Image (spheres, coloured by chain):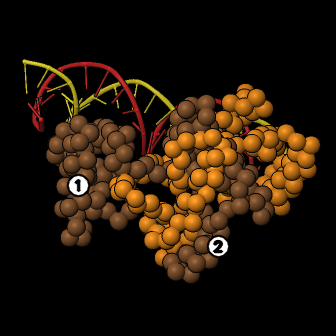
Chain colours: A brown, B orange, C yellow, D red
Amino acid sequence: MGKRSPDRLNWAVQQCRDRGLRRTKALEEVLRTLIGSPRPLTLADLVESKALRNQCDKATVYRLLMRLEENGILRRLGLHDRCAYFTMKYPGKHSDYLICSECGTIEELDIACPVEALEKEISAKSGYRKLYHELEFFGVCPDCA
Amino acid sequence: MGKRSPDRLNWAVQQCRDRGLRRTKALEEVLRTLIGSPRPLTLADLVESKALRNQCDKATVYRLLMRLEENGILRRLGLHDRCAYFTMKYPGKHSDYLICSECGTIEELDIACPVEALEKEISAKSGYRKLYHELEFFGVCPDCA
DNA sequence: ATACATGCAAACATTTTGCTTTGGC
DNA sequence: GCCAAAGCAAAATGTTTGCATGTAT
């Protein structure tokens, strides 16, 4: 947690208040923990974190996360309906996807992916091997809009 | 299913055979269904598909998918440990991630994301609104290698 | 005082495993 | 015939909801 964390916490709490959320212990601790983490956290991570363990119920944290996401305070990573998707892998073929945030429709994009060049660079910098990537675009499809 | 599907099916079956998988009904139907689908499918999608319904057990299809993925025949989309990740969303800040395929470590990447420019283009072409994207890099981290 | 938030328990959905039987090679 | 794969059932995991109680405003 850098020295700017208190500022961020105050800012985040204010965002919540502006949107009508109440300032509760659970809210503050969840925000503080997320702000202090260098990486995204799962519900389990949060519930088991030192700050929250034995302090807040899982359901509380869960509902809080939902509210915070709805209000744009935080971002949820990954495909949004918690199940794994599979697709054929053809040699030399890489696909990116366009997904409707409302109805979940997934379509394949036929674009020249601008990311491939980055892979070498990232591999060199990070020391990771066998690099590949996933790129997904989310938005509201015409039918849902 | 285009006219090239039989070719693809034969190719895919051959890939499997080369890797020591047996040519079973389930294998063929799973491959055929995935090849014929314009979008990625879930386990449930497959099990309920016309070709597989009442033909193959869920566990069979599940294990088949695992084997096929391990053998590089197909690709699995999404964060790989079936749970949601949350992170703070700061105004104007967008993050991409680097994830270890072995141990699941997630780190934030500090790169200039080359994808933002594409969003407008995709939005225009597809009619999707409120576009945003997620970009994740996967690889084997130095510790796991 | 009143709504919103919490805690606990239970329901759900999906994935994963154990074990026996079947069938490809 | 042997071993991988299938089938069935049950366990495990993570998410979500119902309802009574507590608490911020």
In the image, taking residue B1 as reference, residue A135 lies left or right, namely: left
Question: Chain letter of disc 1?
Answer: A
Residue type at numbered disc 2: Ala
Say whether residue A132 is visible: no
Residue A7 rendering spot, x and y as whole percentages? 20, 61
Dot 2: few (<14), some (14–19), or many (≥20) neighbours within 10 Å?
A: few
Q: Is residue A75 left or right of residue A127?
A: left
Please tell me which residue is depicted at 35% across the width and 57% down the height of the picture: B90
The CA distance from mark 2 to mark 1 is 37 Å
SS of the residue at dot 2? helix
> x and y percent of residue A66 in the render?
36, 40
Q: Position of residue A88 (x, y in %)?
A: 74, 51
Tell which of B83 and A92 is nearer to you.
A92
Viewer-nearest of discs 2 and 1: 1
* Label 1 environment density (alpha carbons within 10 Å; few <14, some 14–19, many ≥20): few
The answer to whether one can see residue B139 in this image is yes
Asked if C1 appears above or below A84 in the picture, the reply is: above
Q: Residue at x 30, y 52 (%)?
A: A46
> Which is nearer the N-term, disc 2 or disc 1?
1
Q: Residue A62, located in which quarter of the rendered image? A: top left
Q: Amino acid at mark 1?
A: Trp
| Contact flag, marks 2 and 1 (Cβ < 8 Å) | no
Question: For the point 60% across and 63% down, which residue is it?
Answer: A133
| Residue that numbered label 1 is attached to | A11
User: Can you tell which quarter of the image residue B140 is in?
Assistant: bottom right
On screen, B102 above or below A138? Answer: below
Depth check, front residue: A133 or B10: A133
Instruction: Name the residue tied to disc 2.
Output: A117
Residue A82 shown left or right of residue B51 in the figure: left
